[in-house]
Structure formats: C-alpha cells, structure tokens
C-alpha cells in the first residue's frame, strides 16, 4: 500500500477521532466526569502524593505567662501508586483500506465503525473497573454443571455455594457482550490464601437465567481447572500470577477505595475466610497498621454480606452526617451514588409520605435527585445493595498519558505480519487514587427489588 494512503488514515485517526474519543471516555460515565484528572503528581511511572491523617498539636489555651503551644505539623503520609496500562486495538482489512485510498472522507467511513466500537468498549470496561477493586472481578462461581457449563452467583447473599462476596450479584452480565474470561482459583483463604489464574479463555457463547433469577448458567470452552468456593472470573491476562502480593493490572475502583479493609480481603474470599498470603493494601497502607485509613462502613449487624436490611431515610441521614462531620460541612459528601433499584426504594419511601425529591441537572448532561442539596445519582455498574457517599475532592484519576494512538516512526496504522490487515493501538496510562479514605462512606447489605 502506498504511504500516502496510510498517511490519510493516520490523519483521520488523529483529526476526526482522538479528541472526541477522549471527551467521550473522560466525561460520559459519571465517575469519570466528576473525579479530578491529575497529571502533576505523576513522576516516572508512578503517582506520588500525600494523604492527610492527623492534625497539628500546635494549638491550645494557656494562662498568662505560660509557654505557648509547641509548633508542630499536619500529619501526612506519602504514598505512591503505579500507573495501570490500558489498551484498545482496532483492525482493518488490507483490501478495505486500499479501496478508500482516493478520499479522506472514505477513510473516515471505513474507520468509523471500528473506532466508535472500540471507544464504546473502552468506556464500558473502564466504568466497570471504576466500581471494582483492581482484580478485575467479572463474576463468581456457583457450581459446575459440566466441562463446558457452569452456574454463576446472582444473589447478594445466601448463594447456594461459592461464598458470598464482591461480585456475587453480577451473574453473567459482564460476559453478555464479550465472552472472554478465565477463572481465578483460590486456596486456603484467610491469611495464607493463594490463587492460580487460568490460561484457557472460556469464550462464553451463551448465558441463561434461572427461573427464580438466583443464578445464571453459562456455556463456554472448558477452562481446564477445578473450581472451588471463592473462584471468580476475570478478563484474560488482566491479573498476574501471585508472588509477593497481588499483581493487579486493572484500575482501582470504588469497592477498593471506599471500605475499611485491605484489597485482598475484598476479592480473595470463600464467604467464610478472606485475605491473601501477602497483604494487598490500598496505596501501600495496611489498615491493620494505619487504623485511620478506613472509610465509614454501615454494614449488617452480623457483618458484611451476612444479612440484608431494608433501606430507611434515617440510615441515609446518619451516613450523610457522619461523612459531613469527617470531611467538613460544604466539603463532603458532595455526591451520593447507587443503583437504580435502590434509588427506586428511596423514592418509594418518600412517596408513601407524599414527599418527593427535587430534580438536579449536573454537568456533562448528567442528572440526579436532591438529597440535602447533594445529587444522588445512579450508575449502571454501581454495586447492588450498596449506596456510596463520596467526597469527590479526595479522589483523583492520575494520568501519565491520556488516550492516544501508539505510533511507530510517526505512523499509527501498521501492517499485521503475515496477513493482509492493518491495526492501530489506543493506550492510556492511568490509575485512580484517594487522598483521604476516611471522608467516604458506604451503606451496604441493603435489600432491593429489581
């Protein structure tokens, strides 16, 4: 192919798509739109910043002639988090590219479906990550029907087997539009847990829901592993083999940021015991050492995932007050975010008393309802049974690089060796972090109707 044709495609990718792709992926999902984008804290391939955990002791009241309070400092802990590397690839046929060599507009039409498609795919995967805990949980195993058929948990708690935990309500929803997945099989949960990441793509081809809605059944390629309680599923190659702790590759999300435990306790669990062989702490701060590195968690009296209770407006107000006391009036919470099901529960509570929520229009086309002057919004990937009270100024998405096209010698499109095809690669180096975990809150273990 003539270099001029490739140049036309490269120009189209840069001119017609890149800015729009960045705008869509950084603003269309509500968390991406409202969380700070930070490039100044990134040094090398890490973000380095301070988390505030204590006040100065340099204030106090004295009598005349007494020594003044001793000057001191605010208490900070410096942390560093590695950038996570995120990619998206498009592929074009050689004959299709050659057929559009005479017009830039033809090149745009040729690219349109692939670029818009990968942009939408990245947006969905990124939003899923922003609700996760960095391990890439797509679903949790419930039972093995046969070598090519498995059931997945779909209940918040009380799943027949497999243990309740993060991901128990997912069913097969993250395998519907793309079926690539591998199992992660754990052993000896609780302090000495290890895990093994499967290498055979299950390539899910069909999903069916049980008549009572309590589990999904998937049809897939035999993953060639023996599942046990606590097995969960991830995208292929998105989690490294366990060594001295987790080898997480996905971006951190709210489930890992807004809690009172270490990260491994969230994901490596069989419903009875939790935790890995080596502690995987958020931003290197082990909650067993740094007791201040915890969010405000309102769980069931028997423990998280040990029961469910009905939502009340008093619960909401109590959590709002606790977060406001921690963050400061007018600082936080400044966003409440949950599922559509729990939003409906809250609306019904007020409707019974003939009271209603005011509508709030927000930036980037988002909207919510007014709770104490703060927007309550929903997200398609929000976690069932949970409501998050966020102080947004304490979060950041740290960028080493925003979305861009990978280029070699100035060229974006490159030939695929051995095939009449061309491909281009999008990349972004970023990670989500938290300046102050204690300014966040979550009500969990709530009952709801779908």
Image (cartoon, grey):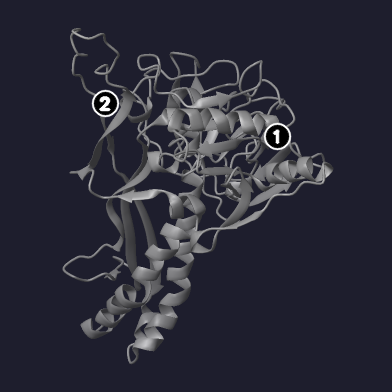
Residue 280 location in percent, x, y? 38, 24
Which secondary structure lies at badge 2? strand
Q: Is residue 383 above or below residue 86?
A: above
Dot 1: few (<14), some (14–19), or many (≥20) neighbours within 10 Å? few
Residue 10 location in percent, x, y? 28, 76
Figure quadrant of residue 415? bottom left
Q: Residue furthest front?
A: 64
Residue in the image at 69% along x and 41% along y: 342
The foreground one among 263 and 197 is 263
Which secondary structure lies at badge 1? helix
The residue tagged 2 is 76
Disc number placed over residue 436 in the picture, else none: none
Q: Is residue 236 above or below residue 77?
A: below
Q: In the displayed structure, does residue 98 sit left or right of residue 303?
A: left
The foreground one among 35 and 356 is 356
The foreground one among 201 and 58 is 58
Q: CA distance from mark 2 to mark 1?
A: 35 Å
Q: In the displayed structure, does residue 270 sit left or right of residue 144?
A: left
Figure quadrant of residue 44? top left
Dot 2: few (<14), some (14–19), or many (≥20) neighbours within 10 Å? few
Please report contact status of discs 2 and 1: CB closer than 8 Å, yes or no.
no
Point out the image quarter for the N terminus. Answer: bottom left
The residue tagged 1 is 313
Instruction: Say whether disc 2 or disc 1 marks the residue closer to the N-terminus.
Output: 2
């Amino acid at each position: 192919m003539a270099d001029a044709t490739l140049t036309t495609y490269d120009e189209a990718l840069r001119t017609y798509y890149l800015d729009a792709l960045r705008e869509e992926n950084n603003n269309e999902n509500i968390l991406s739109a409202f969380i700070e984008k930070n490039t100044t804290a990134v040094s090398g391939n890490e973000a380095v910043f301070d988390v505030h955990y204590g006040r100065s002791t340099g204030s106090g009241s004295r009598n005349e002639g007494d020594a003044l309070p001793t000057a001191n400092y605010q208490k900070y802990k410096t942390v560093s988090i590695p950038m996570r590397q995120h990619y998206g690839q498009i592929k074009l046929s050689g004959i299709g590219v050659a057929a559009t060599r005479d017009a830039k507009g033809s090149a745009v039409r040729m690219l349109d479906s692939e670029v818009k498609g990968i942009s939408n795919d990245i947006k969905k995967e990124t939003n899923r990550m922003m609700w996760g805990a960095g391990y890439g949980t797509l679903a949790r195993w419930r039972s093995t029907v046969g070598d090519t058929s498995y059931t997945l948990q779909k209940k918040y708690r009380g799943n027949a087997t497999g243990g309740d935990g993060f991901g128990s309500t997912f069913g097969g929803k993250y395998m519907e539009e793309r079926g690539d997945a591998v199992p992660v099989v754990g052993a000896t949960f609780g302090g000495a847990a290890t895990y093994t990441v499967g290498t055979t793509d299950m390539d899910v081809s069909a999903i069916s829901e049980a008549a009572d809605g309590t589990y999904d059944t998937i049809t897939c390629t035999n993953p060639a592993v023996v599942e046990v309680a606590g097995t969960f599923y991830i995208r292929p190659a998105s989690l490294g083999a366990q060594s001295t702790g987790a080898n997480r590759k996905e971006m951190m999300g709210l489930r890992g940021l807004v809690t009172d435990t270490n990260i491994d306790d969230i994901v490596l669990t069989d419903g009875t015991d939790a935790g890995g062989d080596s502690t995987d702490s958020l931003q290197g701060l082990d909650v067993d050492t740094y007791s201040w590195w915890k969010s405000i968690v309102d769980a069931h009296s028997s423990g998280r995932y040990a029961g469910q209770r009905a939502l009340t407006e008093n619960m909401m107000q109590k959590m709002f007050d606790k977060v406001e006391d921690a963050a400061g009036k007018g600082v936080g919470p400044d966003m409440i975010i949950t599922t559509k099901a729990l939003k409906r529960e809250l609306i019904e509570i007020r409707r019974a008393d003939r009271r209603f929520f005011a509508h709030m229009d927000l930036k980037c086309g988002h909207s919510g309802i007014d709770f104490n002057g703060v927007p309550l919004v929903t997200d398609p990937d929000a976690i069932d049974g949970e409501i998050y009270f966020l102080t947004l100024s304490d979060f950041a998405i740290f960028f080493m690089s925003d979305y861009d096209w990978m280029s070699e010698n100035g060229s974006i499109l490159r030939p695929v060796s051995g095939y009449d095809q061309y491909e281009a690669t999008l990349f972004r180096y970023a990670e989500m972090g938290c300046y102050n975990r204690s300014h966040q809150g979550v009500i969990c273990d709530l009952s709801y109707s779908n």
